Amino acid sequence: MNKQKHIPPDLDEILKEKKKDKKFKVGFDECGKQLELTYLIMQLRKKKNFSQAQLAEKIGTTQSNIARFESGNQNFTMQFLQKIVFALGGELEIIVK
């Protein structure tokens, strides 16, 4: 059986369409940056071919913590975020405007 890789859709295109809905836009403006960040990290994890369990083991947490992080159902600390990004070979950069 030839199993094709799932490529996640482009977040910018999804958001552009969703933000046309006023109720969605208000909710997104309140918590959207966190969801955007978790989505980008989930895409990086998949690109690096890490399962949630593999990433969890690498940073010393549980798979369920990674799942909650990726679903946006958990607030996260900067330390937790930094561990995930570094484990995936990324670099964490924060810009305040």
Image: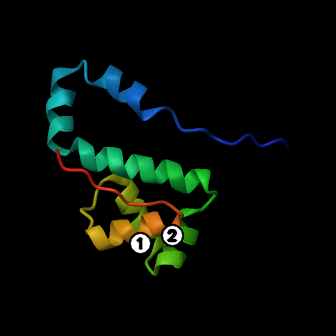
SS under mark 1: helix
Residue 85 coordinates in the image, percent (x, y)? 44, 63
**Residue 53 occupies which quadrant of the picture?**
bottom right
SS under mark 2: helix
**Residue position marked by numbered label 2 in the rendering:** 87
Residue 75 coordinates in the image, percent (x, y)? 24, 62
Marking on residue 83? 1
Note whether 68 is above or below 46 in the view shown: below
What's the residue at 49%, 73% (across, down)?
56
Q: Tell me whether the residue at label 2 lies in contact with that at label 1, contact meaning CB atoms closer than 8 angstroms.
A: yes
Note whether 8 is above or below 45 in the view shown: above
14 left or right of 96? right
Report how far apart the C-alphas of labels 2 and 1 lie in the structure: 6 Å
Residue 63 coordinates in the image, percent (x, y)? 47, 70
Q: Which colour scheme is used?
A: rainbow
**The N terminus: image quadrant:** top right
Marking on residue 28? none
Residue found at the very far right of the displayed protein = 1
